[in-house]
Image: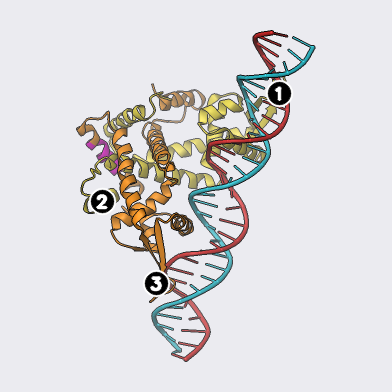
Chain colours: A yellow, B orange, C red, D cyan
Amino acid sequence: MDYIERVREQWAERLPGVDTSPAEVGARVRRVAGLLEEAMAEDLAARDLSRGELDVLTALRRAGRPLRAGEVTTMTGAPGASMTKRLARLERAGLVERTVLERDRRGVVVALTARGEELADELFPRQVEHERAAAADLSDGERAELARLLAVVLRRLDPRDY
Amino acid sequence: MDYIERVREQWAERLPGVDTSPAEVGARVRRVAGLLEEAMAEDLAARDLSRGELDVLTALRRAGRPLRAGEVTTMTGAPGASMTKRLARLERAGLVERTVLERDRRGVVVALTARGEELADELFPRQVEHERAAAADLSDGERAELARLLAVVLRRLDPRDY
DNA sequence: CCACGATAGTTCACAGGTAAAACATCTGGG
DNA sequence: CCCAGATGTTTTACCTGTGAACTATCGTGG
């Protein structure tokens, strides 16, 4: 009897006509994600980084080359206005560098500094470790099945795949 | 080949030493939750409500009685400062009423207004519907298995159950 | 009966996110 | 060659969320 089941019981009393069974999956997914993000963010706080900022560093790191600002925006899915703020902060922190393109001076190229790359390489594995720990009580087969089922749900929610 | 697999491939090139398989579950859970929350929030925006504010309304609704401000804070898990803001906004919108307790004038009782209750009864089923739609491509058995596996992960992340 | 610690909520000051407008620069058709 | 529309990023203005400090009130041991 966990939190979600208790909430469902309360609803059953108040609105018996509503089938709340979808929450068994939906509410749990949201809660698991929330706790995971919280743990990951706490870890980053020690390095004075937010999740959004790490997303920028890791996008650059796994691309393996400097990216146009717009490419980073696309890869992270964040709105452009957010990107400007994150890049400004990361630049101040000495983790990325922004250079205006010569051939098209609207364009901005974002590159990791040596410190930025180091930090990404240090923090990314720690983030994965949080995800590993979360699934620690599952067998290998269960983990694979969970991943498969989530992929089905994901495809439904975001048909363009992405 | 979905988004998560593509990201894992990129990492395999850059940091071959890191086992990114935990992301098959971790990153998908976070992405599914993000898309779900987004869809739910979009729905609420039409009624000029945020998810946090609906959390307050639904907590009151399923309790079935007025609650102390602190009880709402506990039930929703939000920090106290957030609660004050949400209650202030909901009060302005005529959806809840705050009354100072007579016997302990530090205390505040929060009650749904008629409009607040109506709105909760209208919006909560719509929120569940989003969760139902997300799992629409799963068989009943798969849904149950997904719920079970998530419950295991949840217990690991939040041993106090909550 | 009254300080003093505990408790309930609110206020403050500031982070981070975002839509929309603004700005700067480019490009292609006339 | 020039300018109207397209493009890439930043600025603006605002909103929500939050830790920490603060305020008001209560309860209790001396």
Chain hosting mark 2: A
Q: Nearer the viewer, residue D7 or C8?
A: D7
Q: Position of residue B160 (x, y in %)?
A: 32, 54
Q: Position of residue A75 (x, y in %)?
A: 52, 28
Q: Are marks 2 and 3 on the same chain?
A: no
Q: Do labels 1 and 2 share a chain?
A: yes
Q: What separation in Å lies between label 1 and label 2 (alpha carbons)?
A: 58 Å
Is residue A137 in view? no
Circle 2: is it few (<14), some (14-19), or many (20+) Cα within 10 Å?
many
Marks 1, 3: nearer the viewer = 3
Residue pointed to by mark 3: B101
Disc number placed over residue A11 in the picture, else none: 2
Q: What separation in Å lies between label 1 and label 3 (alpha carbons)?
A: 63 Å
Q: Give the range drawn in magenta.
A: B144-153
At 52% from the left and 38% from the top, the residue drawn is A123
At 47% from the left and 57% from the top, the residue drawn is B92
Residue pointed to by mark 1: A105
At 51% from the left and 31% from the top, the residue drawn is A76
Regarding mark 2 in the picture, which secondary structure is present there?
helix
